[in-house]
Image (cartoon, grey):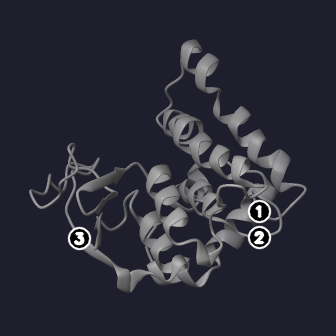
Amino acid sequence: MLTFYHSPNSRSTSVKQLILELGIADQIRTVEVTIPRQDGSGARDPANPHPEGKVPYLTDGEDWIRERAAIILYLTDRFPQAGLGRAVGHPERGRYLSWLTWYQGVFEPVAILGWAKVSHPAVEASLRDYDTALARLEEVLITQPYLLGQEYSAADLLCAAPFAWFGDALPATPAVQAWVARCMDRPAARETGER
């Protein structure tokens, strides 16, 4: 059985939401663990097998998956019936993979660095700056409701998560704000009830 290691109000919340979106909560064992928090609360949980004590973490028998984009890809490939991923051969597969890895490799780092008020020319040269990353979302979302077109996908779930988490502390354009509102106005987002 798949086992999902989760800590409320953390990066693993988006995976919890995905599990609800996929309708597979009965097929995954969820283990709630503690993690060290930025405010000094929490602690590494010995029940969490993640090598750094972080979440999300997913095990499948002897195999393991860490990092949100990888877990999202793994679950949407394994449970394609919900239509939240794009299977190999689908005409939107490349865009789907690109948004997942863009989030993990570009957007999350520049959003965190921007929030922490850290800037350096080397970071901006390789990752871009927050405004440039925001422009990538804007240019897509001014022409269509979701990142892949007319239908919500797990790429939307992942990429909208920091806007929901940080709220007004993370600048957004009207098109991006409307997209985040659409993404958060879903039964699974409401049921998750976590930031």
Q: Amino acid at mark 3?
A: Glu
Q: Amino acid at mark 1?
A: Tyr
Q: Looking at the rendering, in which quadrant would you find the N terminus?
A: bottom left
User: What mark, if any, has residue 13 been given in the picture?
Assistant: none
Which residue is labeled 1 in the image? 146
Q: Residue at x 36, y 86 (%)?
A: 26
Q: Give percent across and percent down for residue 13.
A: 42, 66
Q: CA distance from mark 3 to mark 2?
A: 31 Å
Which residue, as the protein is rendered here, is positioned at the far right? 143
Q: Earlier in the sequence, mark 2 or mark 1?
A: 1
- 10 Å crowding of disc 1: few (<14), some (14-19), many (20+): many
Q: Closer to the observer: label 2 or label 1?
A: 2
Q: Give percent across and percent down for residue 40.
A: 20, 48
Q: Quadrant of residue 42?
A: bottom left
User: What mark, if any, has residue 151 been given in the picture?
Assistant: 2
Q: Residue at x 40, y 48 (%)?
A: 67
Q: Earlier in the sequence, mark 3 or mark 2?
A: 3
**Position of 137 compared to 75: left or right?**
right
**Position of 61 compared to 47: left or right?**
right
Q: Residue at x 20, y 44 (%)?
A: 51
Q: Amino acid at mark 2?
A: Glu
Q: Give percent across and percent down for residue 80.
A: 58, 71
Q: Residue at x 81, y 57 (%)?
A: 175
Q: Is residue 181 above or below residue 105?
A: below
Q: Give percent across and percent down for residue 48.
A: 17, 58
Which residue, as the protein is rendered here, is positioned at the far top? 121
